[in-house]
Image (spheres, helix red, strand yellow):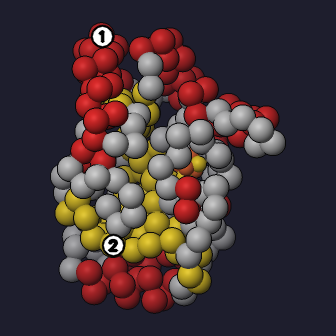
Amino acid sequence: MLVAECFSSLQGEGGLAGTPSFFIRLAGCNLRCRWCDTPYASHLPEGTQVGVEELVNLVAESGRRHVVLTGGEPLVQRDVSVLTAGIVRLGLHLTVETAGTVFREVECNLLSLSPKTSSSDPQGPWSERHRRRRENLVPARRLLRCHPEHQVKLVVQDELESEEICALVKALGVEPARVLLMPEGATAEAVAARAPMVAEMCLRLGFRYSPRLQVELLGGGRGV
Ligand code: SF4
């Protein structure tokens, strides 16, 4: 599998924020979000080919009880089902992060779905393909049905996105208590500037607020 990086860090986002975890970041993505903070795993994928068995061994040797499989978009990789089965067999807690634009059968303890809104739309040759893929909710609904233990995380840039976010949550049929909103931003300052607006949205709409500790505490970039 094409692996961009493996590292130990605190889970930065979602219901398990703050939990020491071992991360596997697979390279390759079928979207091109305008504000993507991991271009080395999406727009310009980099990495090394690592076998599934070797990855499972790295997880076992990490000593962490929580594992996060992220990307890129992990579900575009053909062998991801074998990898998730191998990690779950170790008896560890596995979170799979996905934008939910492609379906693949995977085993995990928490499906962390991050559907994209129009704020992610890029300009240029990828524009139409990106929009078409993010608007197709069929794979996301199927993933949510297959994984009753799920959370839905949404990046927010602007309060004007309220309506679109509510419509998306409704279309996915997700309980508000499982929805977390996070401020967009590549720096701690940018995240802090949007935090009050996102907190207010959470209060108004009944969603949860999620920090982005990988940016706020650890500065963002690789290895966090
Ligand atoms: S889905 Fe994630 S990895 Fe892919 S382009 Fe969007 S933000 Fe980047």
The amino acid type of the residue labelled 1 equals Arg
Closer to the camera in the image, 102 or 34: 34
Q: Which quadrant is home to the C terminus?
A: bottom left
Q: Residue at x 60, y 57 (%)?
A: 42
Could you tell me residue 123's position as x and y percent? 72, 35
At numbered mark 1, what does the secondary structure look like: helix, strand or loop? helix
Question: What's the CA distance linking mark 2 and mark 1?
Answer: 37 Å
Dot 1, how many residues are within 10 Å of its Cα: few (below 14), some (14-19), or many (20+)? few
Please tell me whether residue 170 is drawn above or below residue 215 in the rendered image: above
Side (left or right) of 113 relative to 171? left
Could you tell me residue 218's position as x and y percent? 24, 55
Residue 112 appearing in the image? yes
Please tell me whether residue 80 is drawn above or below residue 120 in the rendered image: below
The amino acid type of the residue labelled 2 equals Phe
Could you tell me residue 61's position as x and y percent? 28, 86
Please tell me whether residue 65 is drawn above or below residue 152 in the rendered image: below
Q: Which residue is mark 1?
A: 204
Q: Quadrant of residue 66?
A: bottom left
Q: Residue at x 54, y 23 (%)?
A: 168
Please tell me whether residue 156 is drawn above or below residue 188 in the rendered image: above
Q: Which residue is mark 2?
A: 7
At numbered mark 2, what does the secondary structure look like: helix, strand or loop? strand
Residue 108 appearing in the image? no
